Image (cartoon, rainbow, N blue to C red):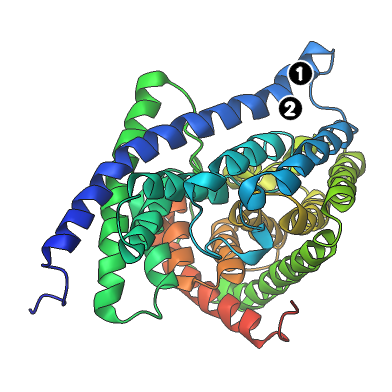
Amino acid sequence: MATPAGLADRGFLRLLLLSGVIGVPIALVCFFFVGLQHELQHWVWESLPHAVGYNRAPWWWPLPALLLAGLLLVPVLTRFPGHGGHVPADGLMSGDPIGPRDLPGVILAALTVLPLGAVLGPEAPLMAVGSGLALLAARSAGPAASKVLGTAGSTAAIATILGGPLPAAVLVLEGAAGLAGARTAMLLLPCLLASGAGALVFTGFGHWTGLSIGALTLPDVPKEGTPDAGDFLWGVPLAVLIAVVIACGHRLGRATAAWTGRDAAARTVLCAVAVGGLLAAYALVTGRSPQEAALSGQATLAQLAAAPGAWAVGTLLALVVCKGLAWAVCLGSMRGGPIFPALLLGAAIAVAASGLPGLGAAPALALGLTAGMTALTRLPVASAVFTGLLMGNAAVAQMPLILVSAVVALVTVEWLPERSG
């Protein structure tokens, strides 16, 4: 087999070596960044309520927390270089990689809004940290090499919370599918090497220190056999419904971004208060903790996957409405990653319907995760791979439904009317 042009070039080999090397410090920085974020989140939502006499965060807890998040975020948006990073509604890989100059604002924005309850994930700030550190190490490289190293740094960072380098590499590969074959390989290989080296260090430090590494995992998932006709009968329209819900939330996020862009200071605070109100509404309606609707949704998704039957349909629908609207507002006003909440929303919709005749909990969870991520990212292969890794051995039997759900969700969002903005 012929070697793609450029892969044997000495300059590219040096670039590949540098990609493997930078994955190690990027993983270390990401480890402590995620660890600090989780410690702050635990303090805000668990330690502090206990300290003031509550068994759990009361229903009104999100109101002052999100107000504070908005007030602290405004100076970052208006005064720091880079305005705290990319707007989440623009997508996970929008724009050029974040440079070193913008890193302080990105880190400060993430450590401000994510622990205080913004309905966003840590994936976008981590990618920004990875690209900024990589570009700092590649200051003497040319523009083309810097862009590859910046992408490799982002991939190494996001691999730390996506369960390993494989889903991160597939994400990059599918996102770069418009490139020619050789050019795609020259982008993918540095990303794969950097994320592999980084994941090894990140995981090792997690075992050594005992700190939570923050990767999205599902320790327990429903175990059922191969999907039958009933699962596909309900699964296809459910994938359509999930795609429509996620697409509508994304569009609302883009509209919110356009609205806050005209007066960032006042309108960002208003959006933060609105998010706090939606999270409080979930707690009032369901009698459960507002923490379930706040934050990225990692913990809530793990609880849902472990015991889907323990969630009433009404509770799941309230979660979808309140968290979905809060997520949409955060997409256009806060800073963070858009994917993790979309995964929970897709799973919640599907599990709420798992009581339908012929639809099992495991197929519902599989199709919900896949459709939710596909509808947001429009990357069906990466979404299917990520769902498979999340569900582990249980995904083997569900793979036909996972693939069909990915295709149906993608076709649905492509057939919806053109997005505004």
Q: Is residue 33 left or right of residue 338?
A: left
Spot occupied by residue 275 in the image (x, y as percentages of width and height): 84, 47
Q: Which mark is residue 190?
A: none
Q: Position of residue 106 (x, y in %)?
A: 60, 44
Q: Residues within 10 Å of mark 1 (few under 14, many from 20)?
A: some
Name the one closer to the observer, 115 or 227: 115
Say which residue appears at 38% left-offset and 40% top-offset. 26
Quick check: 8 above or below 86? below
* Residue 1 x, y percent position in the rendering: 7, 79
The circle drawn on residue 48 is 1
Instruction: Say which amino acid is labelled 2.
Output: Trp
For the question of whether residue 94 can be seen, the reply is yes
Give amino acid for label 1: Leu
In this picture, residue 171 sits left or right of residue 114: left
- Visible residue check, residue 126: no
- Above-or-below relation of 144 to 3: above
Residues marked 2 and 1 touching at CB (< 8 Å): yes
- Measure the C-alpha gap from mark 2 to mark 1: 7 Å
Quadrant location of residue 52?
Answer: top right
Crowdedness of circle 2 by 10 Å Cα count: few (<14), some, many (20+)? many
Q: Count the marks: how many?
A: 2
- Quadrant in the rendering for residue 300: top right
Q: Is residue 270 left or right of residue 236?
A: right
The one nearer the camera, 420 or 220, is: 420
The residue at the far front in this view is 140
- At mark 1, the secondary structure is helix
Residue position marked by numbered label 2 in the rendering: 45
Element class at badge 2: helix
